[in-house]
């Protein structure tokens, strides 16, 4: 069983929106999160979707799921105070669903941002197959600029671009592994890992990667939204004109 866990619990302060969180901003009458969910809903290897959502927006999300015929969402849970806690709530709901459906041993979970709607079917497929083979899979892109890393002694390290990748999503794991890491971090009072990749690496897991599309951006700022709109228009033109 392969379960997508989509987290959409943020308020999107950097987007400067007033009326609604960024995941519910619309392009051509469709919220961003629906663009994201559609990719997993139509993928033949995704069995179920769990969404962690802002509590006050759950009724609206349920309405949008019906309107756009998103059929694989099996649980919607309230998001937490941080991205990590929202993911944990989604993973717990995935665990319950898997047990209820006789798949409690160890399904794969694909953790993905609700505001990252430009992934491709091949990326999801590659994540699932790599996780089956190696135990986890982080979607990455090549580093195109120079990273400067501050060391504990105040000095700087500059890794070469050949040795640098940028982690994006989906980030995919065996459910028992990622849940164990989350529960250990809660016990140890470590709630602020930047993403699941960092959490798993902290607890000694060897991380495996695939390369995803460069356009797989997270929509965080108004500039990101304009890029998203442009990419959607490009894809529509490709379908219409065959270019």
Image (cartoon, rainbow, N blue to C red):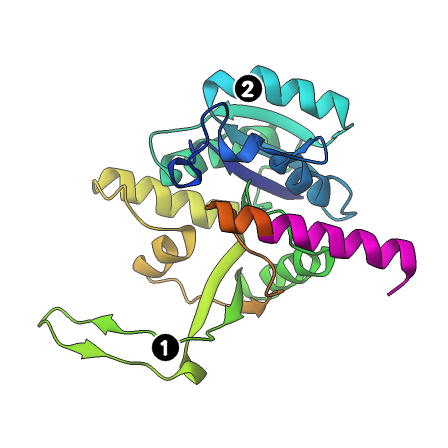
How packed mark 2 is, by other alpha carbons closer than 10 Å (few <14, some 14-19, many 20 or more), is: some
Give the position of the N terminus as an image quadrant.
Answer: top right
* Left or right of residue 225, residue 180 in this image: left
How packed mark 1 is, by other alpha carbons closer than 10 Å (few <14, some 14-19, many 20 or more), is: few
| Quarter of the figure with residue 86 | top left
Q: What stretch is highlighted in magenta?
A: 227-243
| Quarter of the figure with residue 36 | top right
**Which mark is on residue 146?**
1
Decide whether residue 241 is among the magenta residues: yes
Residue 242 lies, in percent from the top left, at: 90, 62
* Left or right of residue 10, residue 190 in this image: left
Decide whether residue 111 is among the magenta residues: no
Q: Name the residue under label 2.
A: 58
Q: Which residue is drawn at 45% across and 84% down?
A: 162
Badge 2 or badge 1: first in the primary sequence: 2
Residue 9 lies, in percent from the top left, at: 45, 31
* Left or right of residue 156, residue 201 in this image: right
Q: Residue at x 34, y 36 (%)?
A: 82
Residue 13 lies, in percent from the top left, at: 38, 36
Q: Give the SS element for disc 1.
A: loop
């Amino acid at each position: 069983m392969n379960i997508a866990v989509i987290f959409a619990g943020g308020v999107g302060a950097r987007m400067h929106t007033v009326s609604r969180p960024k995941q519910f901003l619309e392009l051509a009458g469709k919220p961003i999160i629906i663009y994201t969910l559609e990719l997993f809903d139509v993928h033949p290897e995704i069995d179920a979707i769990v969404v962690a959502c802002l509590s006050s927006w759950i009724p609206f999300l349920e309405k949008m799921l019906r309107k756009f015929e998103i059929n694989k969402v099996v649980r919607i849970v309230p998001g937490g105070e941080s991205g990590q806690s929202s993911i944990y709530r989604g993973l717990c709901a995935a665990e319950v669903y898997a047990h209820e459906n006789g798949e409690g041993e160890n399904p794969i979970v694909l953790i993905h941002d609700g505001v990252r709607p430009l992934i491709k079917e091949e990326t999801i497929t590659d994540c699932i197959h790599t996780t089956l083979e190696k135990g986890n899979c982080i979607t990455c892109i090549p580093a195109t600029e120079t990273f400067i890393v501050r060391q504990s002694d105040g000095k700087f390290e500059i890794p070469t671009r050949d040795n640098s990748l940028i982690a994006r999503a989906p980030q995919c794991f065996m459910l028992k592994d990622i849940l164990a890491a989350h529960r250990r971090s809660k016990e140890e009072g470590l709630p602020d890992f930047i993403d699941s990749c960092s959490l798993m690496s902290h607890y000694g897991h060897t991380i495996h990667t695939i390369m995803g599309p460069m356009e797989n951006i997270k929509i965080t700022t108004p500039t990101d939204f304009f890029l998203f709109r442009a990419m959607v228009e490009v894809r529509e033109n490709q379908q219409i004109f065959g270019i």
